[in-house]
Image (cartoon, helix red, strand yellow):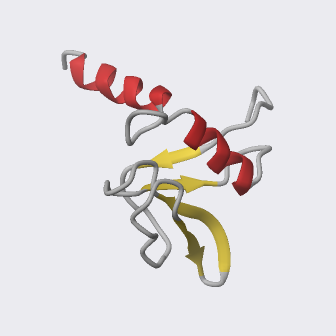
């Protein structure tokens, strides 16, 4: 936010909210709700894998956030940026 650039939230597990189950195919999704407000989406990036939780970030709408996540996840469940950061965090000592 300090840099005033768009940001997207992507997580492997739900922190808050409620949702239904998305379909099993790639791009299937269900809304992530807090009370009656849509705050994100439960998104299937690969057929038959567990979904990801995409949240609305800074200066970006949900549709654009979902599009970015799908374009950054052509081969794996996680977007490539998140996948690499996750791998690096596990490789660091301490």
- Whole-percent x and y of residue 48? 32, 57
Q: Is 4 above or below relative to 16?
A: above
The image quadrant that residue 56 belongs to is bottom right
> What is the x, y in percent for residue 25?
44, 60
Q: Residue at x 32, y 19 (%)?
A: 88
Quadrant where the image shows the N terminus: top right
Q: In this view, does 55 lie to the left or right of 94?
A: right
The residue nearer to you, when weighing 62 against 6, is 62
Q: In which quarter of the image is residue 84?
A: top left
Where residue 32 sits, quadrant-wise, is: bottom right
Residue at left offset 56%, top offset 42%: 70
Residue 5 image point, x, y percent = 77, 30
Q: Name the side, left or right, on which 10 lies relative to 48.
A: right
**Which of the image's four quarters has the C terminus?**
top left
Farthest bottom residue in view: 36
- Front residue of 27 and 61: 27
User: Does residue 93 lie above or below 60 as drawn?
Assistant: above
Q: In the shown orientation, is residue 89 left or right of residue 80?
A: left
Residue that appears at 57% across and 63% down: 41
Toward the viewer: 32 or 2? 32
Whole-percent x, y for residue 37 in the image? 68, 77
Tell me: residue 16, above or below residue 35: above
Q: How many labels does the image show?
A: 0
> Which is more toward the observer, 89 or 2?
89
The residue located at (51%, 63%) in the rendering is: 28
Q: Residue furthest left?
A: 94
């Amino acid at each position: 936010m300090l840099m005033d650039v768009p940001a997207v939230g992507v997580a492997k597990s739900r922190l808050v909210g409620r949702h239904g189950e998305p379909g099993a195919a790639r791009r299937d999704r269900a809304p992530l709700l807090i009370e009656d407000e849509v705050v994100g989406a439960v998104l299937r990036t690969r057929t038959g894998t567990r979904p990801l939780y995409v949240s609305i970030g800074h200066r970006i709408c949900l549709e654009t956030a979902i599009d970015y996540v799908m374009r950054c996840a052509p081969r794996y469940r996680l977007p490539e940026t998140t996948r690499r950061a996750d791998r690096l965090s596990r490789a660091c000592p301490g």
